[in-house]
Every structure is written in C-alpha cells, then in structure tokens.
Image (cartoon, helix red, strand yellow):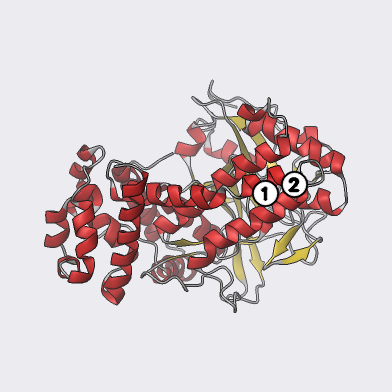
Amino acid sequence: MPVSPLYRPDPRVPELGPDFADPVAAAGFPMTVLRFRNDRAAASVGLDTLTHAEWIAHFGRFEPLPDAISPPLAMRYHGHQFRVYNPDLGDGRGFTFAQLREAGTGRLLELGTKGTGQTPWSRQGDGRLTLKGGVREVLATALLEALGVPTSRSFSLIETGEALMRGDEPSPTRSAALVRLSHSHIRFGTFQRQAYLDRADNIGRLIDHVIGLYYLELEGASDRGAALLEAVTARAARLAARWMAAGFVHGVLNTDNMNITGESFDYGPYRFLPLSDPNFTAAYFDHQGLYRFGRQPETVFWNLQQLASCLTLVSETDALIAALNGFGAAYRRELADSVRRRLGVASRGEAADVELAGAAFRALAAGGAELRWEPFFFDWFAADEARALAGPRGGVYARDEVADFRRLIDEYAPERPERLAHPYFAGAEPQELIYEEIEAIWAAIAEQDDWKLFGAKLEAIEIARGAYGLDG
C-alpha cells in the first residue's frame, strides 16, 4: 500500500484497556461510493498517496491501516444530555480506527468514524448515519476551519447503499460512513463514567493518559488533575470564543460532545447565524433554548464544572475551583482575540481589543435584518473602511449606531495586509453556510444525485480559507 514516508501510526488508546473501550467490527455495506476525500488532511498523516481502491478498502470496508488499532475500539462514556445525566451512553455508531502522528508537528491525531454499525452502546439505534447528515458535517467542518475554529476535519464520506428510516426527515433516506480526523475523542463524559462508577484509580489513569499524550507540559505538576482542568478550561474558553466570533451554534452541547483537547466535533443540528440573535437556537428539539447562541459560553462553563466534579476523586477541591475561576477572564480575552482575528487586524492590547469586540457585536445588533453575520466580518476585513462603506452594506455602516465601531477600528492596523489583495475580497459577498443553501445542496443530491453544488461549495470555502489565513 503506498502510504507516504510521513505515515506514522502510534496506537495509544488500547493502552487504557477494557474499562474504557470495547473492540468492535465495522458493518458490511451493500455498496461503497466515495463522495468526499480530504487529501489535504490526508497529507498531514501520510495517507494522501492511497489509491482510490485502497481508500475504499480502509474507509469504506475498514480494513486496518498498517500497524494501527486493530480491532477498532468503541469508547465508553456517560454524559449530561440537556443537563440530565445519562449513564447509558458510549460510541453507539462509530469507533476509533487509528491514531497517527501529524507531519511537521508530531502531535497525535485520531481517525474516528460515524455510521459504521452497531456497537455495545447502540441501545436501540441502527448504528448508521444518513448521507444528509454526512454532507452537513463535511460542509460544517470546512467552513469552521476556514473561520479559524478548532474543529475536527471531515476526512472521508462514503455512501453505503442502505435505506434508513428516520423520524425527523423524509424516509427512507440514503446512508453513509463518515471518518473524522481529530486531535482526541476523549470526552468530558469519559471522565464522568469513571466517576459514576467511583473508580478514582481509573480517573488517575485517564489523567496520566491525557497528560502524557496531549499536555506534556503538565508532566511535573503536583496536582495533575487540577493542572489538567486549568489547561482544558483555557482550551474550552478559546473554543467557545471562536464559535461566537464565527456566529456558529453547535446545537447539542452535551458533556459527551465536548473533548479534552478543545476541539469542536460531532455536528448534528448546527446552524450558522444568518443575523445577530443571541436567542437563535439550532436544534428543533431544544424547546427551552438551553443551547441557544448566546448561552454557549455559559454552557461550556457548566460542562467544565461537571468535569471538575469528576476530578474531585483525585484532586484538591480548592485547586479545582481556582482552575474553573479562570474561565471568565480566559473567555473574555479569547473572544476579543477571536473577533480581532476575524477582522484581520493587529492587536492593540487586551483592553483595546475587548472594547473593539464589544463594539463589533453592538454594530451587528444595530444592523438588524439588513446586516448578516458573515458579511460584516468580510466587509471590514483588514480595517478597510473605504471598502466597507462602498460595498452593498455601506448604508448600514454609515449609521450613527455603528459610529463607535467605525471610530475604534480606525485605530487598528491590518495584520498581514497582503491578505486583502486576495481575489476573494474583490467580490461583494463572502462564503456563508445558511440553512437554505444546505437544503438546496442536499435537494440536488437527493432528487437528481447531482453533487455539483456540493463540490462547488467546498471549492469556494477552500478559497475563503486561503484568503483569511486563519488556520491554527
């Protein structure tokens, strides 16, 4: 098999043992038709040289990669779902397939699956993924990456030929197997399961595992649990801030949908904001708006508190509280930095950046129905006021309600100003991912098996990613 010299398998999850995961096998599928292949992500782990047939073999039939995890492992975890504790969870339709070292950085990455069949944790589910769900996740991860949000990357999407029955969309519907590339799939809920079972020994093992793989700088900490919580809190604050600056609503921020490396993953009923609205809710079943846009930072902090409660089995309570108390300042700092990055300007110090971020959010609110979320950041990129005022939303920006933002951003210099010369910024409109567009992309696939809109959207998002240069 032509893996490149950059391919470096490093299967570490099996070291945790049977208290944390169960060996499983992928389902057999009637067909395997490749619908998406992320060669840029594949190159980062030495798999871009796979032939088409080899790609299908590994990511459609799940034949093991050389020296990788075999058999695959379905992770055990619990979690709070809409703040109700559920001890009957785990990887119910996916597994960890491989762990690989990233070219250039050496950091550990994982290939995890979704829609690959039943596991011991499937409960009453069929273990499958709808093709529409896979298409939506590929689109979400592409745009989130372009906007600088730490996210899993969609690695592969293969249509699998089964007709699935679902209660929340027209059925029967098409099926797929999705593969994600992520830093880690260890969730807050992984700790919650061990705490529920009163396994302080396993909490300690899990802390050692996480620090040894993902937080090497904490090796010498005297209270390793508290040190880990402090580090995870900082990562979670950054993630929440990047969501807010991107106008992204995850939709289902349960504790089992948050991982210990601060990456966004597992995209179900997500939405990108069309307009500024703190009450915007993504999930149709979130009747109380628990996970609405404006509550995401609060929800992330609540989830961190649940993680902290698990760590009380091995760490000092006062040290854990101190770690949690750092969230507010970290989030404030990260939100200011995230908005500044999105505007393409160089920092003028934390206080000034916080003031600019506040003015940006007020300007978005003042624009009402005439100012969509994403065009605001596109128009003002690199602090080019002349370009913003001359564009299609110039009349909105000239209003008195936006004067404070105009005054503040005028004091900022562009960061890497050469980016504004990218042809992307010569257009009148940015790349967005509004619900209606996703539905149109899916309708073409569902009704005519026409993938042109899907491919064109991914190409356009890739152009935006290169223009913004917000990776990392």
In the depicted structure, whether residue 56 falls above or below residue 277:
above
Position of 215 with respect to 430 (left or right) is right
Quadrant of the drawing holding the C terminus: top left
Q: Residue furthest bottom?
A: 287
Question: Three-letter amino acid code at disc 1?
Answer: Ile
Quadrant of residue 245 within the rendered picture: bottom left
SS for dot 2: helix
Position of 128 with respect to 136 (left or right) is right
Q: Position of residue 366 (x, y in %)?
A: 28, 72
Q: Position of residue 442 (x, y in %)?
A: 46, 66
Q: What label does residue 271 carry, if any? A: none
Quadrant of residue 322 within the rendered picture: top right
In the depicted structure, whether residue 71 falls above or below residue 447:
above
Q: Position of residue 238 (x, y in %)?
A: 49, 47
Q: Residue furthest top?
A: 5
Quadrant of the drawing holding the N terminus: top right
Q: Please give the residue where the numbered disc 2 appears in the rendered image.
A: 317
> Is mark 1 in CB contact (under 8 Å) with mark 2?
yes
The residue at 82%/48% (across/down) is 194
Q: Residue furthest front?
A: 318
Q: Please give the residue where the numbered disc 1 appears in the rendered image.
A: 321
